[in-house]
Structures are given as C-alpha cells and as structure tokens.
Amino acid sequence: MASDLQHLAWAARVAITPDDALSVLAMSRQLSGGRPYAILVEMTEIVDLHPGARASFNAEALVVAAALLGDGPMDEVLAAGARRAVHPTRFFTSEASAYEWLRASLEDSRSGLTKP
C-alpha cells in the first residue's frame, strides 16, 4: 500500500490511550515521509477511546482524510467525535466505499480541492 494511503487495524478489544494515539501518529508520519496522507481506521475492535487520544487524532494536520470503518451503530457512535477533526472524516460500513472516498480525497488534495 502506498505511504499516502494507510490502513490501521487495532488489536482485539483495545482501549486507546493518548500514548497509543501519539505512537500511531508518529508511525503514520514516518510511513508517509512527512507528506500528507489519508487513512482508513478499523473501528470494530475498539472498546474505549480516551478523550486525549481522540483529541490527538482529530488534530493531526498531515491527514488529508480519515475513513472510520465499522460494522454498526455502536461503532458509528464511537466515531462521532471525529466530526471535530481538522481534516475531513467519515464513517463507513463498506471498506470498498471507504477506500473510494479516501482515494478521491487524496486526488482532491493534490489538486488543491477539499471536500467534507
């Protein structure tokens, strides 16, 4: 997978701490070479997202778009806090649709356009 399109899958039944968030963001920046990137985040295994972790994810300026992939209403509720992010964020139940949106977001960012 290209470094400008990343995929994050969490371990089963994970509770994400602020330190976890900072580690993931540091690795994502390294993988992208410090360039803007889009990311698909699988939400189905997350049991808790600390407010400090959410704030770190929401503030990441290098993210062009974040697609949050879940399989039902509970995942969508957990993903709702991402609406405050500095980058476009959407919830999906289809991985194919999420990737389609991420690829379009990357293309738009390269051409100077932005979409919600």
Image (spheres, helix red, strand yellow):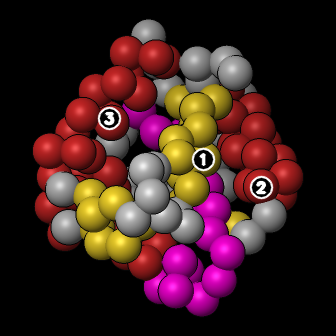
Q: Relative to 3, does residue 58 appear above or below in the rendering?
A: below
Q: Residues within 10 Å of mark 2 (few under 14, many from 20)?
A: some
**Dot 3 corresponds to which residue?**
25
Instruction: Give the amino acid at mark 1.
Output: Leu
Q: What is the span of residues highlighted in magenta in the rendered image?
A: 62-77
The residues tagged by marks 3 and 1 sit, at their Cα atoms, a distance apart of 13 Å
Disc 1 secondary structure class: strand
Residue at 70 percent of width and 45 percent of height? 102
Which badge, 3 or 2, comes first in the chain's sequence? 3
Q: x, y percentage for residue 83?
A: 44, 71
| Between discs 3 and 1, the one toward the N terminus | 3
Q: What element carries label 3?
A: helix
Q: Which mark is residue 40?
A: 1
Q: Position of residue 114 (x, y in %)?
A: 63, 48
In the picture provided, is 112 more to the left or to the right than 11? right
From the top left corner, tell me how far across and down residue 9 is, in percent: 53, 46
**Magenta span includes 71:** yes
Residue 95: give its label.
2
